[in-house]
Image: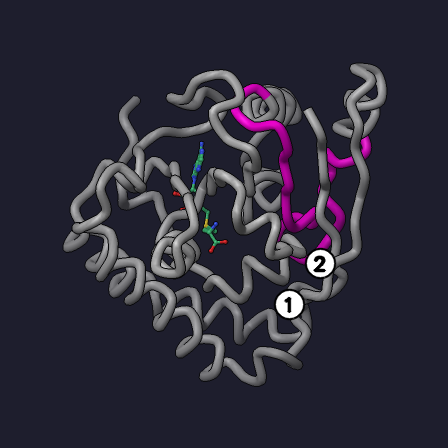
Amino acid sequence: MSFTLDKVVPWGRSYDEYGAMFSLTKADLNKKILGCGDGPASFNAELTKIGGKVVSVDPIYLFFAKDIMSRIDATYDEVMEQTAKNYNEFVWKHIKSIDDLGSIRMKAMERFLEDYPKADGRYISGELPFLPFKNKEFDLALCSHFLFLYSKQHSFEFHIQSIKELCRVASEVRIFPLLELGARKSGHLDKVISMLEKEECEWSIIKVCYEFQKGGNEMLHIKS
Ligand SMILES: C[S@@+](CC[C@H](N)C(=O)[O-])C[C@H]1O[C@@H](n2cnc3c(N)ncnc32)[C@H](O)[C@@H]1O
């Protein structure tokens, strides 16, 4: 079955949020980075502007900017309503209110939409669990708000295959958050960790200084 935009709720975070979610240091930002499932986040646009090397991969890059923009317009109110309905699942500290959230996210997505049509090979259409890249093509792969978050929608096997694929294409992998929707610990996390242990991977769970979903302040770090 082919990928269609009407199943996607585009929602993108900023460069500053990526920096905090993944504890990115100056040295990290000089690495060759893959953003997996970056969607309409502005991390790629902003890092490229200051000289970084980053490629994003996401199934929505099959589409034109105008189509992604229409989908953002069509889903924006619903996302805001859902967030307001689940207000207590979030920490309203750095992001102060629902209105603040809307304006931070829209600013990030507008930056993405401006950059996307003129990016030369920085936005590649593709999807986990199989990525269109060579072995160890990247130093660092980041995956924000896709793996673990959609644990109800994607099976344990999908998570394992996807994590192995990220380890194939990058020397280091960071995944954030480790919660699923509803601000609960991902139902796959313990089994994923057992698998990493069994495969003798070097892994750790690292506390970061970003928390919007309550309890969502940890990333999984894997050296492959
Ligand atoms: C909630 S958004 C997160 C966007 C961005 N990473 C951020 O944190 O702002 C989830 C993204 O995962 C993408 N996605 C969906 N299925 C995917 C797959 N199989 N492989 C990679 N990305 C996928 C969606 O298109 C969407 O852009």
Depth order, front residue of 95/44: 44
Question: Percent position (x, y) of residue 172?
Answer: 64, 33
Compared with residue 102, is residue 64 higher up or lower down, i.e. above or below?
above
Residue at 34% across / 59% down in the picture?
A: 49
Residue 90 in the figure: left or right of residue 47: right
Badge 2 is on which residue? 216
Q: Which mark is residue 212?
A: 1
Depth order, front residue of 167/93: 167
Quarter of the C terminus within the rendering: top right
- Kind of residue sitting beneath label 2: Gly
Question: Percent position (x, y) of residue 54?
Answer: 42, 43
Compared with residue 57, is residue 6 higher up or lower down, i.e. above or below?
below
**Which stretch appears magenta?**
168-190
- Kind of residue sitting beneath label 1: Phe
Q: Which mark is residue 128?
A: none
Disc 2: residue Cβ within 8 A of ligand 1's nearest atom:
no
Residue at 57% across / 37% down in the picture?
A: 140
Badge 2 marks a residue whose secondary structure is: loop
Depth order, front residue of 150/223: 223
Q: Are marks 1 and 2 in contact (CB under 8 Å)?
A: yes
Depth order, front residue of 83/211: 211
Q: Is residue 23 magenta?
A: no
Residue at 35% across / 71% down in the picture?
A: 106
Compared with residue 151, is residue 161 higher up or lower down, i.e. above or below?
above
Quarter of the N terminus within the rendering: top left
Q: Is residue 186 magenta?
A: yes
Badge 1 marks a residue whose secondary structure is: loop
Residue 81 in the figure: left or right of residue 122: right
